[in-house]
Amino acid sequence: MLTYIMRRTLYMIPLLLIVSLISFSLIKIMPGDYLTTARFNPQITAETLQQQIERFGLDRPFMVQYWFWLKNVVQGDFGTSFDTRMPVFRTLFFGNRLFWTIILATTTLILTWVIAIPIGIYSATHQYKPSDHVVTFFGFLGLSIPNFFFALVLLWMLVVVFRVGDHGLGVGGLVDGRFFDQSFSWAKFVNYIWHLWPAWLVIGTAGMAGLIRLMRGNLLDTLSLPYVQTARSKGLAERVVIYKHAVRNAINPLVTVLGLALPGLVGGSIVTAIVLNLPTVGRAYFSALQRQDEPVIMGALLFFSLFLLIGNLIADFLLAWVDPRIRYD
């Protein structure tokens, strides 16, 4: 297992290199650059504009720019933001953005799985019954509603319908203003939960709906296999047949999906974070895209890619734990 971990870790290096080259190429293919707006500003002289172009290195050939960027990254320097004039790491992760991004992604993932897997099992074991149709309906509904629209509707209901502001509760952000200067307490923790549950609901809805459908379909296929019928013919209890034999095999594809779910939550919650005013890495990445802040965009893309590789590595370990037939030697 140790050899496998080392080999997979080493594989990440060329993969990240390829991702960085493709990402850098796509950024350069995009029309315009950070100074596009300045070029159309009549108050900025040509001399000043040329100085800025040379300062940011935008006049260099593509491969020269990429080489200097890569050389600095190897040395641990991800560059300086064109817009904020701060290091890329500080621009992306300023104000505990990384911490709250990881917290939001992992808690959403855990809650989604804890709720979706039992519902999927229940739906499969009650096929075509009214409860199964209800689960199927809400599953398709969750897949159909865009996150940004759900977030806006949820905000409208909390503010306009339930008027939570009248009770001294905020909606956007991470915590109410009255807790900013207070030390950590139980009341502050509860207020954090109050501000996070809309994000859990919005971000987790689509993923939960997909997991329920996937778990239901996999379990139905597994329950029709000969070894399950044999287990039943031996007189084993239905609960033992389902949870000990069928579910362990049916859940394998879902564990594989886990490798894509974690980075998907990190990068896919950008719009939700904007609507709910949450300080995440995705919001900083979106702002950099709007301003074509190339160093920050590259840093964020590498961050998301690293999350994807780590997610796949975790999924491989979980597969070996769930399915005893899988071994990494």
Image (cartoon, rainbow, N blue to C red):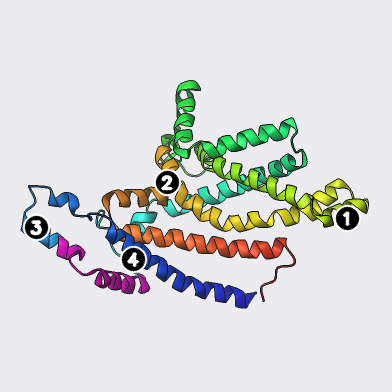
Whether residue 204 is visible here, answered yes or no, is yes
Q: Residue at x 75, y 33 (%)?
A: 129
Whichever of labels 4 and 1 marks the residue nearer the N terminus, that label is 4
Determine crowd level at label 2: few under 14, some 14-19, many 20+ residues with C-alpha closer than 10 A: many
Residue at the disc numbered 4 = 78
Determine crowd level at label 3: few under 14, some 14-19, many 20+ residues with C-alpha closer than 10 A: few
Q: Which mark is residue 270?
A: 2
Answer whether residue 99 is magenta in the image: no
Residue at the disc numbered 1 = 230
Task: Please tell me whether mark 2 or mark 4 is closer to you in this view.
Answer: 2
Amino acid type, callout 1: Thr
Q: Is residue 191 left or right of residue 299?
A: right
Whether pointer 2 and pointer 3 mark residues with C-beta atoms closer than 8 Å, the reply is no
Whichever of labels 1 and 2 marks the residue nearer the N terminus, that label is 1
Whichever of labels 3 and 1 marks the residue nearer the N terminus, that label is 3
Percent position of residue 163, x then y: 47, 22
For the residues labelled 4 and 3, the Cα–Cα distance comes to: 26 Å
Whichever of labels 2 and 3 marks the residue nearer the N terminus, that label is 3
> 121 or 69, which is in the foreground?
121
Determine crowd level at label 1: few under 14, some 14-19, many 20+ residues with C-alpha closer than 10 A: few
For the residues labelled 3 and 1, the Cα–Cα distance comes to: 80 Å
Residue at the disc numbered 3 = 48
Residue extent of the magenta highlight = 53-76
